[in-house]
Image (spheres, rainbow, N blue to C red):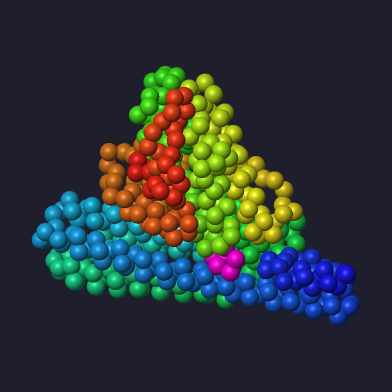
Amino acid sequence: MSNQRKKSMAFRPSLNDSGLETRTVLSGGGLAAAAQANIANAMQTRLILSALRNQNRAAANNLRTLIDSQVAQLFANGPPTAQQRADFNAQVSGEVFAKAFQLSSQNSLLPGSTRLVSMLQNSLLGNGRNSLLTRIQNFSQRVGISGSPQRLEAAISHQLNTTFAGTGARLNNFLATTPLNRLSVDQTGQRIPLQQFMGSQIISQLGNTLGSLAQSFNTNANSSLFANGATTATPANQLAFLNQAGGALGTAAFQLGSDISLFPFNSSGVGPQLQSALFGNTPTSLFTQLQNLPNSSTNFSTAAANAFNGGFSSLTSPLNDFFFLKGSPNLSLPTSQFTNVIGPSFASVSNGFSDGFGSGFMGFGTAPTTFNTNFGTGFNNIVTTTNFGNGFNVPTVNTLPTGVIGTTTSPGTGTTGTTMA
């Protein structure tokens, strides 16, 4: 019976190999089980690393398709005006920023990847003359290149190839030279499979994301729902605020779904659970709880905190099961010391978009008058498309019942809220 149990456990895709390594098992069945577990872990590691490489290539192809379409629109009515060029640059910047956010979130799940993520962001968003954004913006202003759509497309395509060839080479070098298995340890210092380490990082990243959103949620509510000492929010403000919150949750789903996509060998089951926990038409989904917050300033802050804590708990449960982290302690949503995947030196790229224009959460806040909204359009286009591909559907709020923030259309029929900057 004992050997049969060990053999069956060996086929679990994320079995914790540290437990097997520390046992003294002399029987042939036990050694076979350990060997099978190690083989399974090695296969899964290869799939994860392959998925990371594929994401880098997919980012380049996705950007190329989008930018080619926008170049065609730029010249649709003849030579573009200065404002049209500015709008083009803003939208492309939003798209590149979204890809930088996505790839940075994924790469940061790897142990020892801080420098890798920094180099990625410098390549895409940096102020250096060879960064992707700098080159594209220069191309759109250079007379010899920007005079025709063909030359502009060719120049941008060449730069995309060069930039992502570089990011891919750095990723490959990191994967080849970094002792990922040795660095994949739990909180006690015991080695665990890479996929379990990355699963713990995903949960930590999600906690940071929802924690920062919860904090900025109250900040924005005070300035929009309950401005100038108002104790009750107007229906128009409630509707706008809830759709803005839906857009922010869409960004959180974008990050989470992009992370989960690195585990293609067994991710089909967890996706619907995460969709239900975030946007499901149930009393316990995070979006439903946010809709049912009081529209009075008296109890709003406490109710919002409870909603985010409950939502985080609902999300971590399927994630713990998916990554075989059942023994992990129940985590509380952090309330301070939040970090941003995008480094602070790149805030100028987005006129403060990356920090929510001071509110603390990406894009969730009041944009300054200097902000070109085409940046938000470019960012949200990628978020919406990626969420749809990952199985996340962000409902749009259409009506408001009496006394609560609002109700939504049935999940899966709406689109991401458009009031997010």
Q: In the rendered image, is residue 41 in sight?
A: yes
Q: Position of residue 125 (x, y in %)?
A: 38, 58
Indicate the quadrant containing the N terminus: top left, top right, bottom left or bottom right.
bottom right
Q: Is residue 251 visible?
A: no
At a point 61% along the width and 45% down the height, the residue shown is 314
Q: Is residue 417 above or below residue 46?
A: above
Magenta segment's dominant SS is: loop
Q: Nearer the viewer, residue 379 or 183?
A: 379
Q: Is residue 19 above or below residue 417?
A: below
What percent of the width, then of the height, locates residue 369? Answer: 27, 38
The image quarter containing residue 65 is bottom left
Residue 43 vs 223, above or below: the answer is below
Q: Is residue 378 left or right of residue 296?
A: left
Judging depth in this view, the residue of 366 and 260 nearest the camera is 260
In the rendered view of the protein, which quadrant contains the C terminus?
top left
Residue 416 lies in the magenta stretch: no
Q: Residue at x 62, y 72 (%)?
A: 44
Quadrant of res 145: bottom left
Of the pair 65 and 271, the residue shown nearer to us: 271
Indicate left or right for 46 with 232 as reference: right
Instruction: Tell me where residue 46 appears, x and y as whole percent.
Output: 59, 75
Residue 79 location, quadrant: bottom left
Residue 233's spot in the image, x, y percent?
41, 24
- Given the current orientation, which residue lies at the most extreme bottom position? 28
Residue drawn 65% across the image and 42% down it: 332
In the image: residue 261, left or right of residue 161: right
Q: Is residue 70 above or below residue 150?
A: above
Q: Which residues are magenta?
A: 262-267
Q: Does 264 appear in magenta?
A: yes
